Image (tube, grey):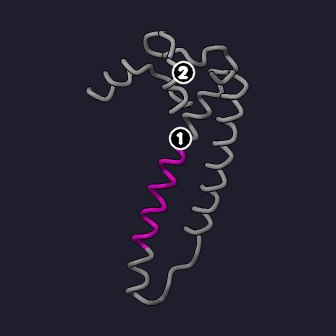
Amino acid sequence: MPTINERKQQLTKRLGELEARLNGIETELDQPMSQDWEDRSAEREGDEVLESMGNSGLDEIAMINAALERIENGAYGQCVQCDETIVDARLDLLPHTHLCRNCATAAAAA
């Protein structure tokens, strides 16, 4: 079972990775478009994929920042909905999760 400091390091490392990836995406999206219509069409499709990746990265960054805040507040590992302890196996898979398995399942079904 990782300690709270190890969880914090894991989250901080992932945050750095995401920020680097988002910077790369932003740089790629800022590139000028090709003058050729066929190339431009392919580039736009690629841009849509990059934007989607960027949006999911931003979502994960928000979840990681919230998890780091819960660590600072002493609430990390507690479900924000039912206040039950989130099992370590779930935190191993989703260290930024804020819901226990039961609440996450209920939220997904809604």
Secondary structure of the magenta portion, mostly? helix
Q: CA distance from mark 2 to mark 1?
A: 19 Å
Identify the residue at horizontal 66%, vertical 21% (top origin): 71
Q: Which mark is residue 88?
A: 2
Mark seen at residue 60: 1
Residue at 31 percent of width and 21 percent of height: 106
Decide whether residue 75 is among the magenta residues.
no
Secondary structure category for the residue under label 1: helix
Q: Is residue 23 above or below residue 101?
A: below
**Camera-side residue of 37 and 52:** 52
Q: Image quadrant for the N terminus?
A: top right
Quadrant of res 31: bottom right
Question: Does residue 5 appear to the left or right of 62 in the view shown?
Answer: right
Q: In what element is the residue under mark 2? A: helix
Q: Quadrant of residue 61?
A: top right
> Is 89 drawn above or below residue 80 in the view shown?
below
Q: Nearer the viewer, residue 68 or 3?
A: 3
Query: How far across and down, in percent of the image, does residue 35 sit?
Result: 48, 88
What crowding class fits label 1: few (fewer than 14 Cα within 10 Å), some (14-19), or many (20 or more)? some
Q: In the picture, residue 39 is in which quadrant?
A: bottom left
Q: Residues within 10 Å of mark 2 (few under 14, many from 20)?
A: few
Query: Which segment did they paint magenta?
Result: 44-59
In the drawing, does residue 78 fall left or right of residue 71?
left
In x, y percent, where is residue 105?
A: 33, 24
Pick the residue in front: 5 or 15. 5
- Three-letter amino acid code of the residue under disc 2: Asp
**Could you say where residue 18 lies in the image, as x and y percent from the top left?**
61, 49
Verify whether residue 47 appears in magenta: yes
